[in-house]
C-alpha cells in the first residue's frame, strides 16, 4: 500500500493551476492508494458543486458545501484513476478561503468522520482545528486513515498538547482496527520534550523510523508561514500507525528531486505491507 501526505498550500502558490497538473501527473505515475492533504482550500464566494459532480464524494457533515474551485476536486478531475474522497472545512484561510482537510482513496469509503481537536471553534480563527478520517479496505484489510493539521507546541491559545489529547479521545473508538494518522503536525521530530516526543510516549509508531529505506525526512527547508525564522530542514509532516508496522520505504517527495515542487511543504510517501 502506498500513502502520500502533503500540505498543499492550496491557491496560495504561484502558478497554482500548473502545479495542480504536476501533482496530478505525479499521483498518476505512482498510483497512491491513500492521499492525505492539508490546507485544501476553496473560495468562500465560489459556487457549489452539483450532486452529479460529487458522485464519489463521501460527506462527513450534511452542512458542508463543496465549491467548484475546491483544490481537491480540481485535482481529482486530472487523475487518471477514480478516487473516492472526503473534505472538511476547518477555518478561514488567507482571509478568503474555506481551508480544510481532504483524503482521497482508491477504494470505496465505508465510513467517514470529521471532529474538532481544538477547544476553540471560531471558524474565523486559524487556531480552530479538526481531523478527518475515513474507513476503507486497503490490501484486503479494513483500516482507518486520519488526516490532521495542528498548532505549534507553544501556541499561547491552542497549544499542540491539548489538541493531541483531544485527538486521542476522538480516535479511541476506532483503535480496534489498524489506524494510520498523518498530516502536518507543526512539531519538529528532533526537538526533545515537545510534541513529537509526546506522541511517541503515547505508543504511536512513526513509519519513518521503521522504514527499511528512508532519507532525511525533512519536509520544510525554508522560512514559511508558521516558521518565519526557519533556516534549517524540519521534519514536521508524518505518517503514524497505532500498531507496529515495518514500512518498506519512507521518501520525501514533491521536492524537486522526487517529483516537482508544488507547495511550500514537501510531501511524504510511505510504502507498507498491511499484514506486517
Image (cartoon, rainbow, N blue to C red):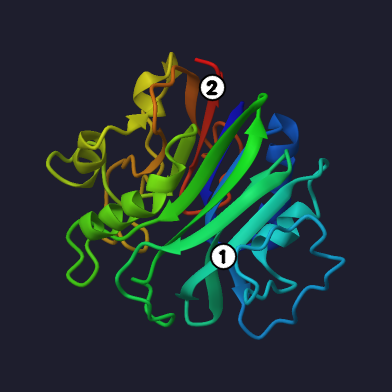
Mark sitting on residue 88: 1
Report crowding for label 1: few under 14, some 14 to 19, many 20 or more residues within 10 A (C-alpha): many
**Could one spot residue 138 in this view of the protein?**
yes
Give me the residue at 53% from left, 42% from top. Answer: 145
* Spatial CA span between label 2 and label 1: 27 Å
For the point 30% across and 57% down, the residue is: 166
Position of the N terminus, as image quadrant, is top right
Q: Is residue 195 above or below residue 227?
A: above
Rendered image quadrant of residue 26: top right
Front one among 143 and 11: 143
Q: Position of residue 85 (x, y in %)?
A: 68, 53
Residue projecting furthest to the left: 193
> Which label belongs to residue 272?
2
Where does the image place residue 196, in percent across and percent down from the top left?
Answer: 24, 41
Residue 77 in percent (x, y) is at 80, 55
Q: Seen in the image, is 91 located left or right of residue 37?
A: left
Disc number for residue 117: none
Q: Is residue 33 above or below residue 188?
A: above
Q: Is residue 163 left or right of residue 79?
A: left
Mark toward the start of the polypeptide (2 vs 1): 1
Up the image or down, 98 lies above or below 13; here it is below
SS of the residue under disc 1: strand
Residue at horizontal 59%, vertical 53%? 112
Task: Give whichever of 75, 244 is nearer the camera.
Answer: 244
Left of 156 or right of it: where is 225? Answer: right
Residue at 65% across / 30% down in the picture?
138
| Local secondary structure at mark 2 | strand
Amino acid at each position: 500500500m502506498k500513502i502520500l501526505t502533503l500540505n498543499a498550500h492550496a491557491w496560495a502558490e504561484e502558478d497554482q493551476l500548473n502545479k495542480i497538473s504536476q501533482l496530478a501527473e505525479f499521483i498518476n505515475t505512482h498510483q497512491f492508494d491513500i492521499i492525505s492533504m492539508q490546507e485544501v482550500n476553496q473560495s468562500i464566494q465560489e459556487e457549489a458543486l452539483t450532486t452529479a459532480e460529487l458522485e464519489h464524494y463521501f460527506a462527513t457533515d450534511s452542512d458542508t458545501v463543496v465549491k467548484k474551485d475546491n483544490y481537491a476536486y480540481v485535482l481529482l478531475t486530472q487523475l487518471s484513476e477514480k478516487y473516492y474522497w472526503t473534505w472538511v472545512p476547518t477555518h478561514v484561510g488567507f482571509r478568503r478561503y474555506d481551508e480544510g482537510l481532504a483524503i482521497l482513496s482508491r477504494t470505496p469509503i465505508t465510513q467517514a468522520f470529521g471532529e474538532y481537536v481544538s477547544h476553540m471553534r471560531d471558524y474565523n480563527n486559524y487556531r480552530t482545528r479538526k481531523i478527518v478520517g475515513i474507513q476503507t479496505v486497503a490490501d484486503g484489510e479494513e483500516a482507518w486513515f486520519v488526516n490532521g493539521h495542528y498548532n505549534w507546541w507553544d501556541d499561547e491559545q491552542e497549544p499542540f498538547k491539548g489538541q493531541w489529547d483531544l485527538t486521542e479521545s476522538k480516535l479511541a473508538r476506532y483503535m480496534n482496527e489498524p489506524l494510520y494518522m498523518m498530516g502536518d503536525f507543526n512539531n519538529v521530530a528532533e526537538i526533545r520534550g515537545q510534541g513529537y516526543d509526546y506522541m511517541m510516549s503515547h505508543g504511536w509508531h512513526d513509519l519513518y523510523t521503521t522504514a527499511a529505506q528512508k532519507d532525511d525526512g525533512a519536509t520544510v527547508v525554508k522560512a514559511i508561514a508558521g516558521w518565519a525564522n526557519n533556516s534549517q530542514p524540519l521534519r514536521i509532516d508524518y505518517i503514524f500507525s497505532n500498531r507496529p508496522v515495518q514500512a518498506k520505504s519512507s521518501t520525501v517527495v514533491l521536492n524537486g528531486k522526487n517529483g516537482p515542487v508544488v507547495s511550500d511543504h514537501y510531501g511524504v510517501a510511505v510504502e507498507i505491507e498491511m499484514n506486517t
